[in-house]
Image: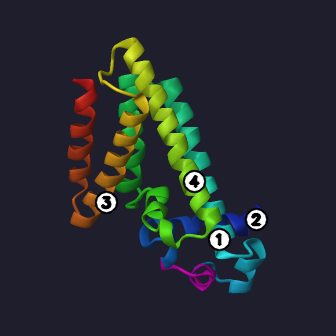
Amino acid sequence: MAKQGETAQRILAIAQRMIQSQGYNGFSFRDIAAEIGIKSASVHYHFPSKGDLGAAVAARYAARFVAWLERIVTEGRDARHRLILYVGLFRAAMVEDGRMCLCGMLGAEADALPPEVLAEARQFFTRNVAWLANVFESGAADATLTFTGPAEDHARLVLAALEGALVFARVNGEPAAFDRIAETALARYTG
């Protein structure tokens, strides 16, 4: 696995940006090396294969995302508020960074990903669905969210709506479209 020195961290950051803007198959080790000003062999030193690099980027992204989810639990007053804060995570990727959700980009390329990268992307979605299902169950208990059927189904629907809203906004060059789509999705649960 990767040695987590300063160079490795720079490689991870650049690879993340490239995946979020160009996709996993849209860059090479040479591209990363050129941006840092090192030889591509140095990238291979830290990450022997592109699959190793992609998996490390996805794992790091997911860990940071999970940290934000934990913050939302402590900051969110109730389930409805947690759901609104969750939408904000996706909005921030688009508005502040001008990028897509990393694992959403990886998901779009699922058939062309190495198994270790695909496994990390799947784990991201699994964690998010579980977290959202918990929010929905809490919302049913505190009467801040209304829905029928399994909480997991609604969790998947919200996650898919947000990922799709990012794609729609990006393709159309219309960040406000993300907000309209997200608001429509949430209105279904928040009345």
Residue 27 to residue 76: above or below: below
Q: Measure the C-alpha gap from mark 1 to mark 2.
A: 12 Å
Q: Measure the C-alpha gap from mark 1 to mark 4.
A: 15 Å
Q: Earlier in the sequence, mark 2 or mark 3?
A: 2
Residue 2, label in figure: 2
Task: Tell which of 122 and 183 is nearer to you.
Answer: 122
Which element is circle 2 on? loop
Q: Measure the C-alpha gap from mark 1 to mark 3.
A: 24 Å
Residue 61, label in figure: 4
Mark toward the viewer: 1 or 2: 1
Task: Tell which of 141 and 75 is nearer to you.
Answer: 141
Task: Name the side, left or right, on which 124 lies relative to 155.
Answer: right
Q: Position of residue 160 (x, y in %)?
A: 36, 48
Residue 51, label in figure: 1
The number of discs equals: 4
Kindly identify the amino acid type of the residue bearing the numbered disc 3: Val
What residue span does the magenta drawing correspond to? 26-34
